[in-house]
Amino acid sequence: MIEVAGLGKRFGDVQAIEGVSFVAPKGRITGLLGPNGAGKSTTLRILATVLQADHGEVQIDGVDALRDPLEARRRIGVLPHGSSVYGNMTARENIAYYAALQGLTGAAAEARIDRVIGELYLEQIADRRARGFSQGQHIRVSLARCMVHDPSILILDEPTNGLDVLTTRALRHVILERRDAGCCVLFSSHVMQEVAALCDQIVIISRGHVAVTGTAHDIRIATGKDDLEDAFLAAVDLEDSD
Amino acid sequence: MNGFLVVLRKELLEGTREWRALATTLLVAPLLGPFLFVGITAFTMHQAIDDVAAAIEIPAIGAERAPNLVAHLRQSLIDIDAEAFADQGDQTARHEALREAVRSGEVEVGIVVAEDFAEALAAGQAARVWVVADSSSNRARPETNRVRNALGAWSATVGGIRLQLRGIHPTVGAPLAVLRDDVSTPTRRAYLLLGIVGYFVLFAVLIGGSQIAVDITAGERERGSLEPLLTMPIMRETLVLAKVLATLVVMTASLAITVISFAVAVQFLPLGELGMTANFGVVEAAQMFLLVFPFAALASALMVAAASLTRSFREAQTYTSIAMIAPTLPVVFAALRPMQDSVPLMLVPALSQHLLLSDVLRAEALDPLHIVTSVASTAAVAAMLVWLTVRRFRSEKLIL
């Protein structure tokens, strides 16, 4: 479970986020939705412990992520936006590197590595160097390596960006599977349909604030719009008029 | 396996996968450099040795007026071309033609015997001979000096005979006997040629590790693999230390190859023929390796620090190029203004290693205090650079 309370972060003159609070429970998929530049990535990067918040609190399965980032990192699997794998290493070596960094060794590590290779349909390319991989193959290896230590929380920043239909479907499949296994999945997107199709709960962020939180149904009611896209725009407008 | 070893092993694995780049950095400067140096040096040395022994021929105008002088020059292996510029007409025109030939570099040196040479000689006066040469030409200098020395020797001989004819002992005209008392040893003379070895070794260390240092810092960041790495449960200082050590492994390989390559290459220098001996055997090579090793540690910390400050691969290459020159500046300074070893100088990294290597090559005793000072100051600067890099890695500027 992720609990975020009153998170704020400023870059120079720009207040990137202010007072961001939400809860992403386990066994649920939470979608972080918002226009470009709304503060989605900043929020996720703080949760992933690569950025420090100016103020606020982040609890990762009860661990204070701001005070004990090392412990928090053992519990999370992160797919940063635009991240990539090592081109000179094979898919398997890339995954094994992260397994070792997470402290997995020996047969247990091998078993986990084989498992994620299977889950992300990487058997065919597991022993090929990543240099020539397609965008979709890249994302699948990235996802496999961040899941290799079987984290209870997955944080995915715009994972479907630039993916073809097949890879998007495979990704969706993995996300649902993780959720059913009791994982807390938090992912960001600016694509409405994707979020509507996948998420149990939606957090709409606009201009660094949380505009609305709830299920797709809740949000439709709160904004008085039937179509989720209209609801989204209404939620963003609501925030603007404040 | 702890995080440090995991990162170190992966960086080295990835480094060896870039084997073409690795082979270039390790083979070109460290392996071929010493042989190139020795090849060029041996070539010039052989030429110097040959030049002393070989007969030369120079144009002489008016040589028929000085047959004894010409005979003396021939004994000194300087042949005379008496017919040179004969078609130019009179003495003045031929003199001018010779000057033009020297000026254009066609002829390196020539002599002109004055028209009143025979008369002046017979009258016991100073007979004039011009040595036509271009003092701005390095190429002509050895031949010019040979001609001058030969003329001077003849002058002294004739002067001695003149004094004897007048019943005076020749030493009367030579009140000073300037004798040579050379305290240099063959090894120290060889250092004149081998002094550049120290500079080269330091430079090879820096070059050897710059590629991997950029790859695993700015390269990792630019390729987008740094941010996910930072979400792994590993301390930033562990990450930095592993990256510095990976660079150090490559730099150490570069250092070892350079020193061994030099030790082998130096055997091909014809030092013996010039009365020199190189103090560069297995023991000296091992000493040099150990003395420079702390510098390799500093250099790897420096390269990683410089490359970490930048946002892109290209920028990192610029920074590391500057960082590559900076440590060698004190060495260049030392070469321009030779200095004696002292404890304060041992506080300057790179310079201290250079001076200690000079001691090894000159077969001078190494002062333990100097070694300790050199190691301590170099390690201190290396630690400071590591600390700076750790700070950089802890700062979120690293990924922004």
Image (cartoon, rainbow, N blue to C red):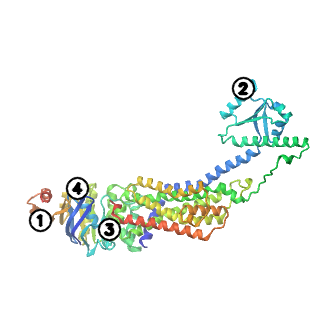
On residue B93, the disc is 2
Chain to which the residue tagged by mark 2 belongs: B
Question: To which chain does the residue with label 4 belong?
Answer: A
| Mark 4 or mark 2, whichever is nearer to me | 2
Q: Are marks 1 and 4 in contact (CB under 8 Å)?
A: no
Q: Mark 4 or mark 1, which is nearer the start of the sequence?
A: 4
Write down the quadrant of residue A141 in the picture: bottom left
Mark pair 1, 3: CA separation:
31 Å
Name the kind of residue labelled 1 in the image.
Asp
Residue contact at pointers 4 and 2, CB within 8 angstroms: no
Q: Position of residue A49 (x, y in %)?
A: 30, 67
Residue B359 as seen in the image, left or right of residue B202: right
CA separation, marks 3 and 4? 27 Å
Mark 1 and mark 3 residues within 8 Å of each other at the beta carbon: no
**Mark 2 surroundings: few (<14), some (14-19) or many (≥20) residues within 10 A:** some
Q: Cα distance, mark 2 to mark 1?
A: 113 Å
Tell me, yes or no, if residue B30 can be seen here. Answer: no
Q: Decide: few, some or many residues near mark 1? Use Cα within 10 Å; few <14, some 14-19, many ≥20.
A: some
Tell me which label, 1 or 3, sits earlier in the chain. Answer: 3
Q: Nearer the viewer, mark 1 or mark 3?
A: 1
Up-down relation of residue A65 to residue A141 (above or below): below
To which residue does mark 4 refer?
A: A36
| Chain-order first, disc 3 or disc 4 | 4
Reading the image, the residue beneath label 1 is A218
